[in-house]
């Protein structure tokens, strides 16, 4: 029997990427007062929790995932007073606020790192990973980095500090040095900071790359990637030997004994189902759920810039395995989108003729899985990928660095641009489209990132006014999770696993069964082989994505998705 129900089983989380959500002061960058001004919209949508991407003081090298003060708000976004008001106003609407916790690394401008870098004898020297050049090599010589690891943001993971002649580790940008979690002082400093935010009223944390904090010692070379020179360091830092110990310690030091409904979700690239069971087993007191990456890697070839079309069979096999793996112990998080992923309707649906239908289909399939669904800002409007003109259109450090590295290695500019158009994180970061006015209601100034040209058609004002919009479909799905126990806690059975066109499954609880059937193609599909087909043909239609009541699970129109109910 699956473990007892918890409050977050019937909750839906909405992710706000503050920089692109709503500007309130005309500087072209979204801010906290902007978020406050849109709380009523979020309340109408019905979400239970808002996860705020980082708003802390930051040089913004990676849009706030490089933090220089964990206990203050970046002036771009506002002040601590604004933040307190946001929490109060969200709570008044029954919405919880979850912060982004970025503690695998800090900014290189964080006082901890400034102190650490100041001298080899600094008391904070071993708060970070400092190492001499590779044995027998001169600091700065090609290949003298302590290991061969390739950074997520291109180039080596090691940066030479000329003054001391030592290198520091940065899995991400050179302005994001990795903290040394082996040092108990580091851990205590992080826990104290987390307690400070909880005491201030926040309701939990989304933990950035938290399965990378424990490294395998000593740090050593990884398998060489392609023709080299770089290697894959991930065996040395994905779910390292002390990861469970660290998360259990964090739970004890930060969360234990606190009243109220708190939420913890660990972002965990490359995590396996087996590991996720351990991380999310309530009896182990680690985290409530994890973000896994398997399903958003299925359209990658050798690496994320080598894209291929998604095969629906792979998607069903993957998500089905996660559903089965966490059925008895632990809990899934469910997402298509976040600030790092291209827009789902462009990636897995059809953002042309069937934009509305396919956006609703994706929502239906995801939200009826077992797990906590996450909605990324604009997803509820069916926002699409950005039509990037040329290299100067990309702002994100990952894209900018990849462009330089790939063209530097001789790849054709047009090929690199095409890869970026499909895969760039900037696809998710264009401003939320609030209305049809010149800057889509996002700002009265010049937006830091251009608004999508389709905002006259795709925008919140139109969507809220149209009962058949993608927005109202999300609203109904969220309501369904709140009101139907089978959506929150029912078990999951995959059907028609071998169909290359149809995604079908049931959910069951206490004599109630829901059948979800979705056509992932732009053609009509007959659905054959459904168990108890005739009973389902006569069953009550709970929700569909075509605005009429003719829907049957046995024959689906292009991108049609239906939810029927028995019992
Ligand atoms: O991302 C972690 C991560 O591994 C990837 O999803 C990353 O976005 C990248 O695409 C790898 O190719 C988290 C944050 O979500 C991301 O925004 C940050 O840039 C990153 O950590 C560093 O803090």
Image: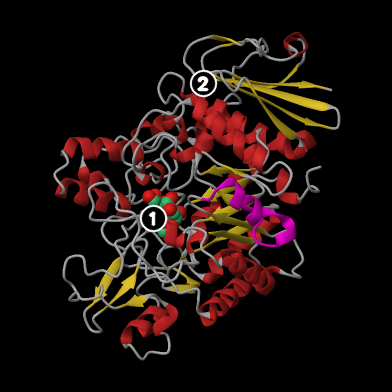
Q: Residue 244: say if magenta.
A: no
**Closer-to-camera residue (48/437):** 48
Q: Residue at x 70, y 54 (%)?
A: 281
Label 2 packing within 10 angstroms: few (<14), some (14-19), many (20+): many
- Image coordinates of residue 262 in percent, x first then y, are 69, 60
Q: Residue at x 46, y 50 (%)?
A: 22
Q: Is residue 287 left or right of residue 172?
A: right
Q: Secondary structure at mark 2?
A: loop
Report the residue marked by disc 2: 520
Give the image location of residue 164, x and y in percent: 25, 84
Report the residue marked by disc 1: 29
| Quadrant including the C terminus | top right
The span from disc 2 to disc 1 (Cα, nearest Å) is: 36 Å
Q: Quadrant of the N terminus?
A: top right
Question: Is 278 part of what is drawn in magenta?
Answer: yes
Vertical arrangement, residue 470 with respect to residue 21, above or below: above
Query: Can residue 389 be seen at all in this image of the molecule?
Result: no
Asked if residue 377 can be seen in this view, the reply is yes
Give the extent of the magenta segment. 271-289
């Amino acid at each position: 029997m699956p473990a007892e129900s918890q409050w977050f089983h019937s909750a839906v989380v909405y992710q706000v990427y503050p920089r692109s959500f709503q500007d309130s002061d005309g500087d072209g960058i979204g801010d906290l007062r902007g978020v406050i001004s849109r709380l009523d919209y979020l309340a109408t949508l019905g979400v239970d929790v808002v996860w705020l991407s980082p708003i802390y003081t930051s040089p913004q090298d990676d849009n706030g995932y490089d933090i220089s003060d964990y206990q203050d708000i970046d002036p771009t976004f506002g002040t601590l007073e604004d933040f307190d008001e946001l929490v109060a106003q969200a709570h008044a609407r029954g919405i919880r606020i979850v912060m982004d916790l970025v503690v695998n690394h800090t900014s290189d401008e964080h006082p901890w790192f400034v102190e650490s870098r100041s001298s080899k004898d600094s008391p904070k020297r071993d708060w970070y990973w400092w190492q001499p050049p590779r044995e027998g090599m001169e600091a700065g010589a090609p290949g003298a980095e302590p290991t061969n690891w390739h950074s997520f943001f291109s180039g080596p993971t090691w940066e030479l500090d000329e003054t001391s002649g030592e290198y520091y580790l940065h899995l991400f940008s050179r302005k994001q040095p990795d903290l040394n979690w082996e040092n108990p002082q580091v851990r205590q400093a992080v826990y104290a900071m987390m307690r400070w935010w909880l005491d201030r009223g926040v309701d939990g944390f989304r933990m950035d790359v938290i399965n990378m904090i424990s490294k395998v010692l000593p740090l050593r070379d990884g398998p060489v990637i392609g023709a080299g020179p770089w290697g894959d360091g991930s065996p040395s830092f994905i779910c390292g030997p002390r990861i469970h110990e660290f998360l259990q310690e964090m739970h004890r030091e930060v969360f234990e004994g606190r009243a109220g409904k708190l939420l913890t979700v660990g972002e965990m690239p490359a995590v396996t189902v087996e590991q996720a069971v351990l991380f999310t087993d309530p009896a182990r007191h680690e985290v409530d759920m994890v973000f896994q990456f398997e399903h958003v890697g299925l359209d990658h070839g050798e690496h994320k810039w080598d894209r291929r079309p998604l095969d629906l069979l792979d998607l069903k096999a993957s998500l089905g395995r996660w559903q089965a793996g966490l059925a008895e112990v632990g809990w899934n998080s469910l997402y298509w989108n976040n600030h790092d992923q291209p827009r789902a309707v462009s990636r897995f649906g059809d953002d042309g003729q069937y934009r509305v239908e396919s956006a609703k289909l994706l929502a239906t399939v995801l939200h009826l899985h077992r797990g906590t669904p996450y909605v990324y800002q604009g997803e509820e409007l069916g926002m699409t990928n950005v039509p990037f003109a040329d290299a100067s259109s990309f702002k994100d450090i990952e894209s900018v660095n990849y462009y330089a590295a790939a063209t530097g290695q001789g790849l054709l500019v047009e090929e690199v641009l095409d890869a970026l158009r499909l895969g760039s994180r900037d696809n998710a970061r264009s401003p939320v489209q609030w209305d049809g006015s010149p800057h889509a209601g996002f700002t009265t100034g010049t937006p830091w990132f251009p608004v999508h040209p389709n905002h006259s058609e795709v925008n919140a004002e139109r969507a809220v006014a149209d009962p058949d919009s993608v927005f109202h479909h999300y609203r109904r799905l969220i309501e369904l999770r709140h009101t139907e126990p089978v959506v929150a806690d029912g078990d999951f059975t995959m059907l028609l696993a071998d169909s290359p066109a149809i995604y079908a499954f049931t959910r069951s609880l206490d004599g109630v069964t829901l059948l979800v059937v979705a056509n992932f193609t732009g053609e009509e599909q007959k659905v054959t082989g459904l168990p108890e087909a005739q009973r389902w043909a006569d069953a009550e239609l709970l929700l569909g994505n075509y605005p009429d009541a003719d829907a049957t699970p046995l024959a689906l129109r292009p991108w049609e998705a239906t939810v029927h109910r028995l019992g």
